[in-house]
Image (cartoon, rainbow, N blue to C red):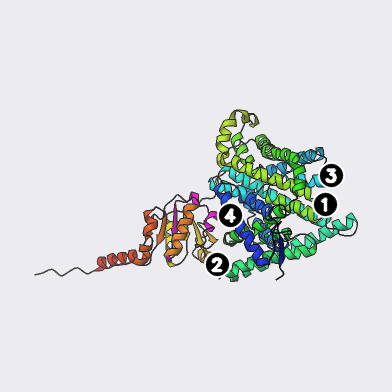
Amino acid sequence: MRPTACYREHVDFELDTFGLTAAILAIAGVVAFLAHRAKQPLIIAFILVGILVGPNVLGIIDEAEPLELLAEIGIAILLFLVGLKLDITLVRSIGKVALLTGLGQVVFTALIGWVIALAFGIDLVPAIYVAVALTFSSTIIIVKLLTDKRELDELHGRIALGFLIVQDIVVIVAMIALTSFGGGREGSIGEQVLFLVVSAVGLLGGVYVIARWVLPPLLKLLATNQELLIVWSVAWAVALAALTDVLGFSIEVGAFLAGFALASTRYRETIAASLSGLRDFLLLFFFITLGAQLDFSAIGEQIPAAIVFSIFVLVGNPLIVLIIMGLMGYPSRVGFLAGLAVAQISEFSLILIALGRDLDQVGDDMVGLVTLVGLITITGSTYLILYSKPLYNWLEPALRIFERKKLVPTDDFEPEKHDAIVFGYGRFGKQLVTELVEEGCSVLVVEWDPYAQVQVDNDDLADQVTVVFGDASSPEFPEALPIRHARWIISTVPDADTSVVLATALRQHGATCPIAVTAHTDAAGARYANAVADGTISVVLHPFRDAADDALEALKRCEPAEPETP
């Protein structure tokens, strides 16, 4: 392991890569804690860590090369999860509003941003990069904020998520175009276009064949072991990302396609939940690296432009969405709340401008400009979304001008609902689900066994029962479930510790309905005492005890009558 030289004004010492990473993580942990206590986005905290440890301040690292590999893997995992969660059904369910709003906002923001960039004297190609970077909003931040506010299932939340997905598709197309035409490939424009088309068709065709005929049977085998499934998923994402990099596209494109290939499988929720922590950990290296590479002398010159661009993103982007949705007949309240979702630029904006720098099409000054806009807008939009409803109430009279007299019915958009969510489809779970279906309930079954769907089909319950592949012990998994609309949530998992973790996670993610757990022994029932006392668990089911009571009653009913005494 090659030592990395670390220099400060009065100190000359060396750290190997492990020691360097440990020092940076320690500083990141402290800064992230302070940012969390101050209720600031962690993305900003990690960029500030990069500035702090970079050559401009502490000088712990002069170059970010030791961290770049981890940063690239983090970006690949991020794009993999975006592709994995690309729910085409969601886009279709909210109709044309997601597509028109998403594309309309991208087009108008890019055009206006390009004009502003040219007005500041920015050259043509860098101006295009900056304008396109302004169009993308952070799906991760918005989903997190709306989830915390329990607004993701409301109409404005679903519309916002829909056009954020449209934005994600646009940024992938933009990355393909940039890496194809800007990578220094020899030949005429026509030859480059032909190469792009042939490569794209071959790549997409190959991914389709694998997703259609190879992945389904392979995933059934892999899903028998959770660790095997997760390790394979990461390997699949990184391998396809490496392949597209070799073909001349980018690792982002390959990682996205790797996730999209798995998006239609019932394993996507558990893969996404298992990798979310890894994604967040590895992405911090990207933002730290980005912060360490900032040129403060260049940023100082960009402050006036950054302020103007930030005002445009914070005010102009929501206004564009509000106008588009108003023309489509949506109430000003829905348009305003959805529009706040685009009041910041995203991690994709930073990735895009960094990609332009790697292609020698923009300089460090433009990277500094977009990063500074990101710092301002991410911070500002966080507060706008947190106080969105009081803000709308204050602005409501002025926003009424964006409403049409004839509004579209907003009560037609109902989220997916299930009467009951049952974890486990074993002997007790199967019987419980059958009883619920006979009572007319729709049931969502969460099961780690990949053959649970086959059992449901064999039991002729497929019309009333939906099966999701997932791990009850994962504290992140409940976030992917429609738990806020369920009447009951029942865990038939026999392990008491797992059920306590599950019930706690369900409450943390917003479950308000009764939660029932299963105890096969009196000792297991005693493990639930604290969770029952604090209201986390509503009721403890004892299937064996109840079955024994029912069996005794049945035996008593069959007992022969005693003969009469003469």
Q: Amino acid at mark 2?
A: Pro
Q: Residue at point 58% right, 35% down?
A: 391
Q: Amino acid at mark 4?
A: Val
Residue extending farthest to the left is: 566
Residue 188 circle label: none
- The mark lying in front, picked from 2 and 1, is 1
Nearest to N terminus: mark 4 or mark 3: 4
Answer with left or right where residue 391 lies relative to residue 191.
Answer: left
- The mark lying in front, picked from 4 and 3, is 4
Nearest to N terminus: mark 2 or mark 1: 1
In 3D space, how far apart are the residues under numbered discs 1 and 3 (Cα atoms)? Answer: 10 Å
Q: Amino acid at mark 1?
A: Gln
- Residue 480 belongs to magenta span: yes
User: Up-down: is 49 above or below 131?
Assistant: below
In 3D space, how far apart are the residues under numbered discs 4 and 3 (Cα atoms)? Answer: 41 Å
Reading the image, the residue beneath label 1 is: 361
- Residue 509 belongs to magenta span: no
Nearest to N terminus: mark 4 or mark 2: 4
Reading the image, the residue beneath label 2 is: 450
- The mark lying in front, picked from 3 and 2, is 3
Reading the image, the residue beneath label 4 is: 30
Q: What's the magenta region?
A: 471-495
Residue 124 circle label: 3
Q: Secondary structure at mark 3?
A: helix
Residue placed most toward the observer, 538 or 250: 250
Residue 39 x %, y %: 56, 46
Residue 424 x %, y %: 47, 63
